[in-house]
Amino acid sequence: MMKIFYFTGTGNSLAVAKKFNGELISIPQVVKGKNTLVYQDEAIGIVFPLYCLNPPKMVREFLSRAKLQTEYLFAVATYGNLAGASMQALQKAVKSYGYQFDYMNTLLMVDNFLPNFDVIEEISRMPKKQTQKKLEKIISDVFSRKRYMPKVTQKDRELSELCVPLMEQQDRGENAKAFIINENCTRCGVCVKVCPADNILLREQVTFCNRCESCYACIHACPQNAIHLKNEKSSKRWRNSEVTLKELIESNQ
Ligand SMILES: Cc1cc2nc3c(=O)[nH]c(=O)nc-3n(C[C@H](O)[C@H](O)[C@H](O)COP(=O)(O)O)c2cc1C
């Protein structure tokens, strides 16, 4: 038996998490809902996206508080472009909590970071990313209980160092305050339901608090395409085709 803990904004990480056929557990739900995070299983996996070369803040909080009792602990980070030395940094962090991952890997998928990437172009880059092939390898590695850590270069480490201030800024939770809600908003509440951090209030207008995880779930899932960034490459939005809006809501509500 296997437990898979996951965090997802636009479905990539949930699509991957589902492939392990384990018991799926939403990290936002357990972090928000329970004080003692003690779990036991033959194997335990964590699947999450990278934001500024790091796991989302809530995933880091989960890993700092959880007691994961297992013979085999693994992590898969989905990302769109550059992973830097993210797995090394995460391994170092969890070692300071007294445990370590047996297997870590990264998986290139569609990049949903709208300031740098246009979703249509990203979809056209998919064949080059060879996601399916690498995912099959990761699943086979995990089922054979392989131990592995991706190799990184000095450049990767430097990139991760450069991203520390960006991550710290992101961790303040205020990114959504710069999101623009346009006149297409019908106050349908989908943004509230897909937000993993309970960061959105539906008042006279949609209001963002200061717990934003920067996952962009609200922006990408808005049925009216009413949430925008000042500096987005295009207004096209993304949800992984193997994940429904209902699943995103059930994961993050
Ligand atoms: C705020 C933000 C920051 C991101 N930073 C990175 C990054 O540093 N490196 C990278 O390759 N992809 C980055 N991405 C892209 C996501 O990691 C990638 O699209 C991921 O698969 C999304 O997973 P999800 O659909 O489960 O939310 C970022 C995305 C967002 C929204």
Image: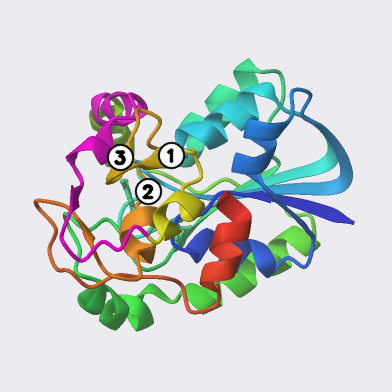
- Residue on which the image places disc 1: 86
- Name the quarter where the N terminus is drawn: bottom right
> Residue type at mark 2?
Ala
Task: State the extent of the magenta-drawn residues as a range.
Answer: 165-187
What's the distance in space between the residues labelled 3 and 2, CA to CA?
A: 32 Å
- Please give the name of the residue rendered at 47% of the width and 39% of the height, measured from the top-left corner: 55
| Quadrant of res 91 | top right
**Label 3 belongs to which residue?**
207
Which badge, 3 or 2, comes first in the chain's sequence?
Answer: 2
Q: Residue 76, how many percent across, how many down?
A: 57, 52
Q: Which mark is residue 168?
A: none
Three-letter amino acid code at disc 1? Ser
Task: Establish whether ligand 1 lies closer than 8 Å to the Cβ of label 2.
Answer: yes
Please give the name of the residue rendered at 77% of the width and 29% of the height, measured from the top-left corner.
37
User: Whole-Å distance between the Cαs marked 2 and 1?
Assistant: 6 Å
Is ligand 1 closer than 8 angstroms to the Cβ of mark 1?
yes
